[in-house]
Every structure is written in structure tokens, then in C-alpha cells.
Amino acid sequence: MRERGWFESAETSGRAWKSGALAPRQETHAGAGFSPTGPQGLKAIASRRRNAALKGPLFHGVARPWAILLVSLLANCAVVCAHAQVTFERLVNSAKEPQNWMTYSGDYSGKRFSGLDRINVANVHTVVAKWVYQTAATGKLETTPLVVDGILYATAQDNRAFALDARTGRPIWMYQRQVPADIRPCCGHVNRGLAILGDKVFLGTLDAHIVALDAKTGAVVWDVVAADYRIGYSFTVAPLVVKNLVVLGVSGGEYGVRGFIDAYDADTGERKWRFYTVPGPGEPGHETWEGDSWKVGGAPAWNTGTYDAATNQIFWPTGNPAPSNRGEGRAGDNFYSNSLLALNADTGKMNWYFQFTKHDEHDWDATQVPVMLEAGGKHLIAQANRNGYFYVLDRTTGKLLSANAYGKTTWSDAKDADGRPMANQNASPTLEGHTVCPGALGTTNFMAPTYDSQTGLFYVTARDQCDIFSTAPQPYEPGHAFYGSAYFPSEEARPYRGFLKAIDPATGEIKWKFEHTSPTWSGVLSTAGGLVFSGDAEGNFIAFEAASGKVLWHFQTGGAVYAAPMAFAVDGKEYVAIAAGSAVYAFGLP
Amino acid sequence: MFRRWSVGLAGFVFLGAAAYCQNPLAGDAKAAKAGEYEFRINCALCHGLGAHGGGRGPDLTRAVKKHTHSDADMFQVISNGIPGTAMPANGTNGQGVGMTDEEIWQIITYIRSQEVKAPPQALGNPGHGKELFYGDANCSLCHMVAGRGGRLGPELTSVGGSRTREAIIDSVRNPSRRLAWGLTEATKEFPQEYESVTAVTADGKKITGVTLNEDSFSVQIMDAGEHIHLLEKDKLQSYQKSRESAMPKYEVEVLSDKELEDIVAWLISVGAK
């Protein structure tokens, strides 16, 4: 019944624009003819549009208020009617169309930076809620919406995906794949978003399917299975489209899966390559696993990587070795768990790897978004890692350039010859348990960071918490949780503290920090308006001055924030969106 | 590997077919061991290693439990949580991964294997404890039990059922200790921490009390007269928060060990109802 109601409303929404009497305008935000040069371009076009419309022959003799209304209607229709194909070239050149947000991180570099500046330091205090879309899902919303040419595409819990009119929040279509009753994905029935290419959007599901949906209708175009959910494989990741491939990594580090990163043909769903993050017999790195431990070695790849078109390399981070809290039985470095992998986008062959935490026993997945930066003529990649260190690598070679703690850490007091922090004698969990910082949740986790090239700062949500890590033998049972132990919050570090931190990647120095009331799971967005947006566990969505960390605006959403913000524009109007509680919110100037 | 999985699946189907009124694994030592792994992952955060109770969850080794009597009750409580308490539904506490029916039965088998059959010996005199609570010890000025008492401090009707004797004694002798720890992620739905606060409003009015709720921009304070103040932080002249409890530290000179045992005995007797 609910589904039917849903489609009825979608149809109503569809009629509203399909039956419009006005012809589409020639000038649109999308398509090859439009190439604004950043936010200034967008402003210029908006201004040109206003002037031209009011003086043009169409409006001869039309009273001014009517003219404005007509212009507004024309512009609205233009955006929605001209649904252009998303090409790989558009994805590579996404900076040229800041009104759109076409990948999980907003661009291939992972910066989560919006070139829009209509909402800025001077006016953000006037920002109001424009619409709220209720997903009817329960649990944590971790989605980052995509917006392409006026349509917003996002996901919600329990294998939901939907498309909205980005101006109004009114639904266009909704898709939901039945969740098997016996599924138990770790950490909630969550999903972090879609990828888009051509006229299709791509969803990874909790039961380890990859589904291509028609972007206009939500109809299934193809549906393939990557692995068996009953033994712990699932997808929560937002896929990344590269050329004609849909790339995504699997979840399941809590179940002793053998992790992998897959690439599927966007047209057919045919799998083009798979990179196993745990090497099998005969493969380099296999010797870093004791006995048969590689078979259940984990190393999932559940967060979205980045892509460097110049070298055709995908940078994809990997998670913890399994069992997460017990190193006994898997002696060795456990390649390629907790690593950053540089893969050839066409073949999935590995060019280089860098392992952040060797032989991890604390569940410190290195799955944080790796962000591509340019500095001093060098091509860099930076990651604020769950283990508490901020790493900068040369992304051409994978060589470590620096590693600096950005939160409370106790597990390392020495670095190896490469400069990599190494675990000290006291870091391993014991049967009785002992305290290590950061705790199992990490200094940061899946929450997306942002890099703002205007301030040169890297912004990340961080927490100071220490846990008591205990360990105990646990036999592997297919489909059963495989932790090898438990962890408990340690009293030594209480109360736990949560921050938004601005890190200078050149030095690792914390330039400013804002302390939240309690630790939060929100990601961070930076914009050309000199702003940084993030949320908190108490339900606030907050705008900060990027340079100083000063709070400039906040809104109470009524639900804890687990998602990362993004920004888009329609008809020259900028919006900032965030998922919180069970809803997606869009904010803009009054 | 697949063969092992098939066996597990068959077992699961069999269990699924059974009605949820009887534990199909009751008394099975192997199931109890498996349940211990699951308990560590899913339950020990609040209920402590060995199920002896933690700062938040009750001691489950007690044979008499407040919310559950039969294994079927326990299955229901683990699956769905207990509304109005910090006990979450299976798979929603942000810690473990959620359990299958089979794993829940394993946990119940484990808990049963840990139970101490003798009821906890009340060391004190509950009748005298009640007198003290409402009388000379002044507990009821701030704490309510069964609808009688004050509102400034935590409501204590069920505390005897959900906290160990040792935890209650510690809270009276060292009221600031647990406050200093703060809340854990899994208990965020109960945001009240009873932090002590002092706020000075724009017109110079000083408000002292405990927090009912707080975020980065607003705070709700109850003062000693049980008045609730709803304040926006950016409109205050000053705002200071302390993790020193508003509750006085009850030293032995003020409240003897015997008297404290009497109060605890009464709270346990009320909490068990």
C-alpha cells in the first residue's frame, strides 16, 4: 500500500513538469553548451538570464511581476526537462559544473569541496530550510545525495534508493530491494550513496547485489550478485564510476570474509575485474598470513575510493584483518588489510600499496576517504586514519611523506624507516583487557572529510576515546560474527570528546578545532563561500567559518547526523543538503 | 567451508521452526560457550564481562530478574529491547552485528549457566533503609522512588534491579565518579547526565542546577527548586559546567556502612518488584 501511494505522488510530481505549457529554454545548466568557469560563471549566467529575460521580445508589454514569474517557470522547466547524460568526461571535469554533485565525494579527488559561493560567510546566518524529505526508513542515514541537472538521487536504509526534484524535495521515483530476513550486516542496514553514469544510477545492496537503475524511472536495468550475504558479504559503499566501470568494495570484516574490490561494466553488469584484498596462494603478500588464516582474513573495502585520471589509477582504502581483535592465528603483516591500494582502473592490477596499520588488533579499518592534493609540484594523497594519524603519501609512488597524530593515541611511540608509526609492546589486546587509544571506533571512522584548497586545510570529524581491548579465542563459523573478542569504553579517557578539526596537511598541525557536545559521526563539506558544514550527534547541522572555525549558523534537524553534507544549485540557487534522523534536508538562502 | 555453513543453516532452519517458547539449546555446554562469545560482543558493554553487571546494565547472574522470568521472556527482551530503558533491540546498539535466533538462544543458555541460584543476600534492613531514605539521610529531597520524593536527581525506583549493590554504594560514597565518565554511545538515548551547571542570563540572573539536556547551542537546567530553565547559550553572560556532582559525597561519618546497607537493601527490594 505504501509503495502504491508513493508512486501516485511520484506521478503527480511528474505531471507537474511534463505537462507544462512552456517550452524548454535553450540555456540549461547541463549539456555541452554550458561551461561556467566556476562559481563566478554560475553567477554571471544567472545575472545574464535575469537581464536578458526582462528585456527580451517575449516579454514585450508583459507586466514586470508576470515576467519574473514566467522567467522563473521557464528556468525551472529547463533544468528538469533537459536531462543530459552523465558522461565520464563530465565526471572528470566536475569542477566545471559546481551546480552538480555527481560522485560520492563531489569529485574524483575526494575533496568534498563545492565550488558554489552564493551561500557564504557574509550571508549564511540567513539560511533557512527549503525542504525536508522523509525516507520512512529507520536507523542511521549515511547517504550522500548526488544531484545532476536538478534531480537529487540518494539512498536510505534497507536497500532503498530514490530520486527527488532537487528544488522541492518532491519524489520522482523510489526503489527498494527486498532485504532477506536472515541478513545481519554489521553496524546497521546502512548505505552511503549511489554512483551515476549515462542514464543509470548504481546501488550496492546489503545482500551483496549490484543493481543498475534507470535514472528516470528507478526501474531495474540489470542486477548481479557479487557474493553470498549469508556468510557475511554485503555492500554499504557508494560505488565509484570510472570510465565505463562501476567500482565498489565489499563489507564484512566482522564475519571473516575475504575482501575484494570489484569493477562491473556499466552497460551490462558483467564483472570486468576483481582485486582480492587478501592475496591467495602464489600471490605476492600471501606469506603475510599464517596458515589458512587468509581464507577468512577480512580486509573489506567498504568506503569509496578516489581516482586520478592523469595516471588512470584508482586509490581504494581497505579495512581490518579478521578476526578484528585477535592477532593470534594470523601472524604476519596481513596484507593488504588497513592499506591504501593504487589500482589500474582498466585492469584492477595493483601499482602500489601502503599499509597504515600492520597486523591490526584494534579494528582500525583504514577505509577513510583518501584525498588527492597538489602541493609544491607534488601529487599527494592524504588520509586522516582511524588509528589516529594523519598520513600524506606521494600518490605517484605510494611513498610515505609524513604521519602525524591528530587525536589522542597511545599505541605507537616509534616509527619505522619509512616514517610509519609502529605499534608498541603494550598495544596488543589481552585476555583481561587493557586500555589503548584510540578506541575501536577510531579517531575518525567512515565520516567523510573535506579539503578546502582556499584555506589549504583538511577538515575531519575526530573523537578522543580509549577502549579496553580484550581478546579471546573464537572459532570461525560461517556467517557468524568473528571478532575474537570484545572492547569496552575505558574510564581513563572519559568523558569522550568529539571535535571538528582543521589540519594543515603540510605540517600536520591542528589549525583550529571545535568541540562538539559529544562525539559525532557526521562528515564534513567545504565550499567556495568560505564555509565548512558538519553535523552533530544532538541533531544540529552547523556552518563554520572555514578559516577560523567560528560557528556562523546552526539548525536543529531533530535526528543525529551520520551522513556527510553536499552542495548543489538549481536555477542559480545554491542548496546545502544533509541526511539526519530519517530525513534528507536541503537548506538555502531565503 | 561451505559444508560447515550448510550444517549451520540446517540447524538454523530447525531452530526457526521451533516456537519461541522454549530454549532448544537449554543446558547445552557447547551452546553456552558459543553464547559467551556472542555475549562479549553484544552484551558485555553494559552487562559486564561474565554478566556480573556493569555501570549501565543489571547483573544477569541473579536468578531473579526484573524483566524476564522464562527463557521465552529473555528471548523477547533480547530481540526487541525494553522500551523506556537503555536496553536496545537486537542489532541496534551500535556495538555487535546483531544476532540470529540461534545466537540469542546461545546467549540465554550462557546466561543461565552463569546464574547464581541463591537470591542475593540483603545485608541490610530494608525497613530501616526506607525510613532513612525518606528521613534523616535526606535522599528523597532529590530522588524519587515509586512516585515519592524529589526530581533533581535520578529517579531510583528500579535502580536496585538494574545496578549491583557495589555500584549503588559507590554512587553514594563517590557521586561524582560515574558522572565524570560521561555516557557511552550505546546510551545516548538517555542524554541526562546530571552535570552541575551555573548560568548567568543576559539580565544578570544566576541559575544553578543540573542539566536535563544540552547541545552545543541550548541547555535545559533544573534548579534546586525544581524549576526548569530553557536557555540559549549565546544569550547567556556566562555558562559553566562541572562534572562534580550536585549530590553531596556521603562519608561514613554522615552515613554509616550499616545505614547505607539498609538503604541499599530497601532499594534492591523495591527494584525487584
Image (spheres, rainbow, N blue to C red):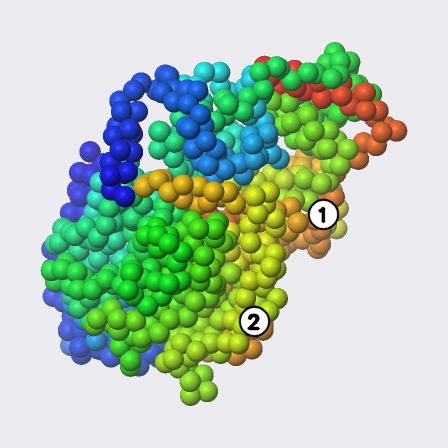
Q: Is mark 1 on a helix, strand or loop?
A: strand
Is A183 in front, or is A521?
A183
Q: Is mark 2 on a helix, strand or loop?
A: strand
Q: Position of residue A228 (x, y in %)?
A: 24, 46
User: On what subunit does the disc labeled 1 rest?
Assistant: B
Tell me which residue sits at (11%, 66%) in the image.
A23
Contact, CB < 8 Å: mark 1 with mark 2? no
Horizontally, residue B60 falls left or right of residue A59, namely right
Q: Residue furthest top?
A: B127
Quarter of the picture containing the N terminus of chain A is top left
Disc number for residue A398: none
User: On what subunit does the disc labeled 2 rest?
Assistant: A
Q: What residue type is labelled 1?
A: Ser
Disc number for residue B242: 1
**Compared to B5, does B264 lie above or below?**
above
Q: Which amino acid does label 2 sit on?
A: Lys
Is A54 in front, or is B74?
B74
Tell me which residue sits at (71%, 41%) in the image.
B177
Distance from Cα at disc 1 to Cα at disc 2: 39 Å
Q: Residue furthest right?
A: B253
Disc number for residue A415: 2
Let me know if marks 1 and 2 both belong to one chain.
Answer: no
Q: Where is residue A323 in the image (x, y as percent from the top left)?
A: 42, 49
**Displayed quadrant of residue A548:** bottom right
Q: Which residue lies furthest to the bottom in this view?
A: A377
Q: Where is residue B92 in the image (x, y as percent from the top left)?
A: 42, 38
Q: Tell me if mark 2 has few (under 14), some (14-19) or many (20+) residues whose alpha carbon lies within 10 angstroms of its own.
A: few
Residue A16 appears anywhere in the view: no
Quarter of the picture containing the C terminus of chain A is bottom left
